[in-house]
Image (cartoon, rainbow, N blue to C red):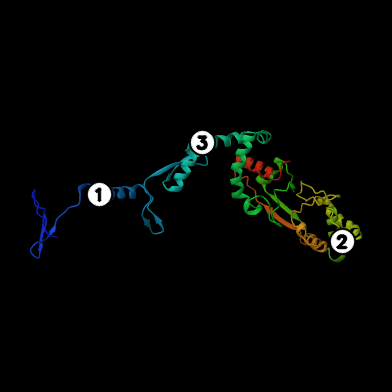
Amino acid sequence: MANPANKSKQVETTGHVWDGDLREYNNPLPNWWLWSFYATIIFAVVYWIIYPAWPVGKSFTRGIATVTVEENGQTKEMPWNSRSQLIAEMQSSPAAVKQREYIEKVGAASYEEILANPDMMAFARSMAKGYFGDYCAACHGQGGQGNLPFFPNLADDDWLWGGKVEHIQASISSGRKGNMPAFANVQGQALDDLASYVLSLSGEAVDAAAAERGKQGYAMCMGCHGAEGKGNPMLGAANLTDKAWSVINIPAAGSIEEKKKLVAGVINKGIAREMPAFGSRLKPEEIKMLTVYVHELGGGK
């Protein structure tokens, strides 16, 4: 670039000249730009020291920043990261403090008080919906609809172990083992007749003579299901008269023969299923809110 006339002063050059009048100017960067650049370098170094930054093998530099959180009722310092920062905010933010206070309020209330208080019920539902999604939905479904044959429907107001809040709390806290012995020795006509009788208890249209014969074989079932097939919540024995099938899907069967085949399969193979206990995994107030939520899924009793 040609050097233009400059009446005030000549622009400093590097001394390089081409073709007699083509000079290389020496235009240094503005000071504000240089100091901004130096500031970014200083900021980066400070950041590397304070926060997690550089990978080191399979780990990384932890930094010196810490976050104070509460864990198992004790205050502890944790290295700073986005997760520990989120935990701290969830524990100390105004919303978190208010939520914790309300959880304590619900935890101190009786089931009668919670069920009668719309505000407490709304809060319990909102909290327990998350608990249900974390601990129950994988087996019982997001809406509690169950998944036969292993996981009963929680939304139909038919309760194997009782549907009162104290029964549901016991189920959640201590777990349940639902076992029915297999009667593999019952075969042929005797099995068909017994299946017919079981279906007749819930009003299914079966052969009356076959059901009458099957009534004799039902004697081995009375100990758990009762003489009238009403079940026994103390044992988790299903009510066979209410059309709520907790192991097989009778309503979906297309014919009476298919229905008898499903019932016969349960008689021959028995039932072995278990619900884990959550008493050691959930806090008492969490179990209380989850109990209320499950209770409401089935319409309450």
Q: Which residue is mark 1?
A: 38
Amino acid type, label 1: Tyr
Residue 109 picture quarter: top right
Amino acid type, label 2: Asp
Q: Secondary structure at mark 3?
A: helix
Q: Which residue is mark 2?
A: 193
Q: Secondary structure at mark 2?
A: helix
| Left or right side of 52 for 41 | left
Disc 2 from disc 3: Cα separation: 63 Å
Mark carried by residue 133: none
CB within 8 Å, label 3 to label 1: no
CB within 8 Å, label 2 to label 1: no
Q: Which residue is mark 3?
A: 97
Residue 71: give x, y in percent of width and height.
50, 42
Point 31% across, 50% down: residue? 44
Residue 55 picture quarter: bottom left
